[in-house]
Every structure is written in C-alpha cells, then in structure tokens.
Amino acid sequence: MLEGLEAVRKRPAMYIGSTGASGMHHLVYEAVDNSIDEVLAGHAKNIDVILHPDNSVTVVDDGRGIPVDPHPKFKNLSALEVVMTKLHAGGKFDKKSYKVSGGLHGVGVSVVNALSEWLEVEVSRDGRTFHQRFQRGTPAAPLKVVGDTEDRGTKVTFKPAPQLFGDLKFSFETLSTRLRELAFLNAGTRITMLDERDDKKHDFFYEGGSVAFVKFLNANKTAL
Ligand code: 0RA
C-alpha cells in the first residue's frame, strides 16, 4: 500500500481537507500526531512546537527517533526516507502497535513533506545525530551524520509551500487551542509552544487529563 507523493501534490485537499488556513494548520497537527504516537508508545514525554518568522514550523520530540537503518522493503532507502517520501508508510512497522492519535485525516508526515517548500528532519539516536533535507517531498540531499549526541528524538522543520497556501501565516491561537487539548488528552505529556515572531510562549502540562480539561472549560463559569 505504498505509493509516491504525486497524488498528494496533485490533490492536496483530499489529504489535508483544504489548501486554506485549516489545511495549513493541519500540517502541524499531522507532524505533532506522529510525536504523540511516540508518546502513546511510551517513549516520548515532551513535544516542542516552534513558529519561525518565515512561516516554517519545528516539531521536536524526545522519542526513539525515526529509524535510520535500511528499510527492509526498499533496500536502497533508509527507513527515515521511506517514512518521509512514501504515502502510508508513516505508521509503526510492527503489527503489535497501532496508531491511535490520528486526527481527522491521519495521513502521515510524508503528506506534510509533499506539501512543504522544504522540510528538514534531524534524528538523534544510537549516539549520533542524522539530518536530511527535502524539497516538495523529494530528497535534496542524502541522509547524513552531522554529529555525536547522547540525546534521542526527532525534530522536523517544514515550510508550507506558498504555491499552495499563498501568504497565509500560522495562527498561534489556533495552534495553541489544539495543542492544549492534546496535552489534556495525553495526561503527563508536556507540550510547549514558542512563537519566534513575537516571543509568545505556552507550556501545557496536565496531570489531571480530562478532569483538568473540564475544569479549564469551566473556569469563569458557574457550574450546574
Ligand atoms: C517507526 C518506528 C519507530 C519509531 C518511529 C517510527 C518514530 C516516528 C516518529 C515521527 C516523529 N517522531 C517519531 N518518533 C519515532 C521505532 C524505532 C525503534 O524501534 O527504535
């Protein structure tokens, strides 16, 4: 069930709902959902989302890092390149685990890649940091080792393609509403946000889960 990203570039709305503001924000949710899956698998605790002045976005997690070894089915490609460039290859490879966090579409990070002017991924695992850059979903350079590290995790930075989204800008408010809900739904997960355009910040961390969510909704209201 793997295929190239041509279909996504041709009919973006089929994958992200629209090429308006809602679709563009969906790209961030898609990237964050991948990190949430790593939380649900029990390997990540922190997700950071950073909005940059050029309308690119970074999503970082402290999970295991996307695997970088050769992919069993695509002998010449790293697993990372398969996750990034093949449709429907975003899920975990083992059958025991399954994707639970996927939102409305749940189409995977390759769709984000296909609809981005450029995307850079940095993976830290097994003592090393790896980096690869893509343009409109196509590798612009091979996967490279860029340093040694003790850290683990995945960092994805992408800029939505202006050919599709025009000069739309990310809304800090829209993203914070969704990311706060994800923090409520995934009790014990810390989700931070930084808007580099004006230095606004959020730090969402709720031990109380849905109980804390109801308290949040009820703030400044008279409960029945
Ligand atoms: C496939 C397998 C494994 C981890 C991931 C994907 C993974 C994907 C993303 C996307 C964003 N953050 C992520 N973190 C992990 C497991 C690899 C292993 O067994 O070490």
Image (tube, rainbow, N blue to C red):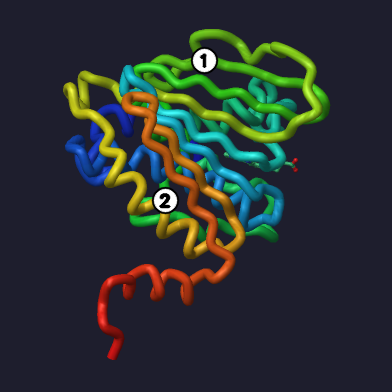
Up-down relation of residue 74 to residue 222 (above or below): above
* Residue at point 21%, 25% (across, down): 164
- Answer with the quarter of the image where residue 104 lies: bottom left
- Find disc 2 in the rendering and name its residue: 179
Along the line of sight, which residue is nearer the eye, 211 or 25?
211
**Left or right of 110 in this view: 35:** right
Position of the C terminus, as image quadrant, is: bottom left
Up-down relation of residue 174 to residue 100 (above or below): above
Tag of residue 223: none
Which amino acid is tagged 1?
A: Arg
Instruction: Tell me the quadrant of ligand 1.
Output: top right
- Answer with the quarter of the image where residue 89 lies: top right
Using the numbered discs, state the Cα–Cα distance from disc 1 to disc 2 in whole angstroms: 26 Å
Q: Is mark 2 within 8 Å of ligand 1?
A: no
* Residue at point 52%, 47% (across, down): 191
* Residue at point 17%, 37% (across, down): 20
* Residue at point 66%, 40% (across, down): 62
Which amino acid is tagged 2?
A: Leu
Q: Position of residue 66 (x, y in %)?
A: 65, 34
Can residue 117 be spotted in the picture? yes
Up-down relation of residue 214 to residue 56 (above or below): below
- Find disc 1 in the rendering and name its residue: 133
Between tags 1 and 2, which lies in front? 2
Along the line of sight, which residue is nearer the eye, 96 or 103?
103
- Answer with the quarter of the image where residue 147 lies: top right
Up-down relation of residue 136 to residue 193 (above or below): above
Q: Of the two numbered discs 1 and 2 on the same chain, state the one appearing first in sequence.
A: 1
